[in-house]
Image: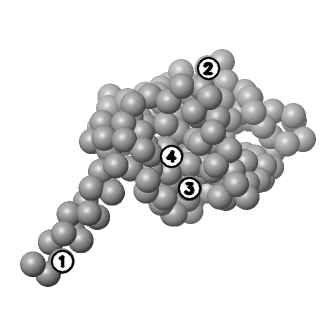
């Protein structure tokens, strides 16, 4: 995430609070983020061959139906030639919002999908480990064989069977014969 995107996200969040539109704008930015990551849209936004008028029309289409603050920001980014901010705007906004709400984002990797009670247990464990509310992203990684890996911020707890087997192999290779 760029510093510039963080600045625009901060300004947008500050404008969204009094308007009571923090979550609406978050949802709009998430949808917009999905659209700007499309290869064709990304190519058109960054291409020097696309005229300013075409670029403005495309941004107007991307902003259609979105909250007025999001539409205003899109217009500002076009006028200031800062469309590259769009690629990092949603992650920056989400990060600021999570910090404000006392939440942390985490990733849990498992060999199989988690059922709701198991996900609730892992979420509670993550909450106790971090001391904050946790939003977990579940990723299925069959190569783990069993157990889980939990990443909160830059801390990794690895309780996977793959990790245990790798550690056992290292110990066996180092043991005297």
Residue at image position (36%, 41%) is 146
For label 4, the residue is 107
Label 2: how many Cα within 10 Å (few below 14, some 14–19, many 20+): few
**Relative vertical location of residue 167 with respect to residue 93 in this rendering, above or below:** below
* Foreground residue among 73 and 118: 118
For label 1, the residue is 175
For label 2, the residue is 64
In screen coordinates, is 65 left or right of 79?
right
Q: Which mark is residue 152?
A: 3
In screen coordinates, is 129 left or right of 89?
right
Q: Which tag, 3 or 1, sits closer to the chain's start? A: 3
Q: Which tag, 1 or 4, sits closer to the chain's start? A: 4
* Foreground residue among 54 and 64: 64
User: Which quarter of the rendering shows the C terminus?
Assistant: bottom left
In screen coordinates, is 8 left or right of 58?
right
Question: Does dot 3 land on a helix, a strand or a loop?
Answer: strand
Residue 34 x/y as whole percent: 48, 30
In screen coordinates, is 13 left or right of 48?
right
Residue 51 shows in the view = no
Question: Does dot 4 land on a helix, a strand or a loop?
Answer: strand
The label nearer to you, 1 versus 2, is: 1
Label 1: how many Cα within 10 Å (few below 14, some 14–19, many 20+): few
Question: Does dot 1 land on a helix, a strand or a loop?
Answer: loop
Residue 114 shows in the view = yes
Q: Which mark is residue 144?
A: none
Q: CA distance from mark 4 to mark 2?
A: 33 Å
Query: Farthest bottom residue?
Result: 176
Q: Which tag, 4 or 3, sits closer to the chain's start? A: 4
Q: CA distance from mark 4 to mark 3?
A: 7 Å
Pointers 2 and 3 in contact (C-beta within 8 Å): no
């Amino acid at each position: 995430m760029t510093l510039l995107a963080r600045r625009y996200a901060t300004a947008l969040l500050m404008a969204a609070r009094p308007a009571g539109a923090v979550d609406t704008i978050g949802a709009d930015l998430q949808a917009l983020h999905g659209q700007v990551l499309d290869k064709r849209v990304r190519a058109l936004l960054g291409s020097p061959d696309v005229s300013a008028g075409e670029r403005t029309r495309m941004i107007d289409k991307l902003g259609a139906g979105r909250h007025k603050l999001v539409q205003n920001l899109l217009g500002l980014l076009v006028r200031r030639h800062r469309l590259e901010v769009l690629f990092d705007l949603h992650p920056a906004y989400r990060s600021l919002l999570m910090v404000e709400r006392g939440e942390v984002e985490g990733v849990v990797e498992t060999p199989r999908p988690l059922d709701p009670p198991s996900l609730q247990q892992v979420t509670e464990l993550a909450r106790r480990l971090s001391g904050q509310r946790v939003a977990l992203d579940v990723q299925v990684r069959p190569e783990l064989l069993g157990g889980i890996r939990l990443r909160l911020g830059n801390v990794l707890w690895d309780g996977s069977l793959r990790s245990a087997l790798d550690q056992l192999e290292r110990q066996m290779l180092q043991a005297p014969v």
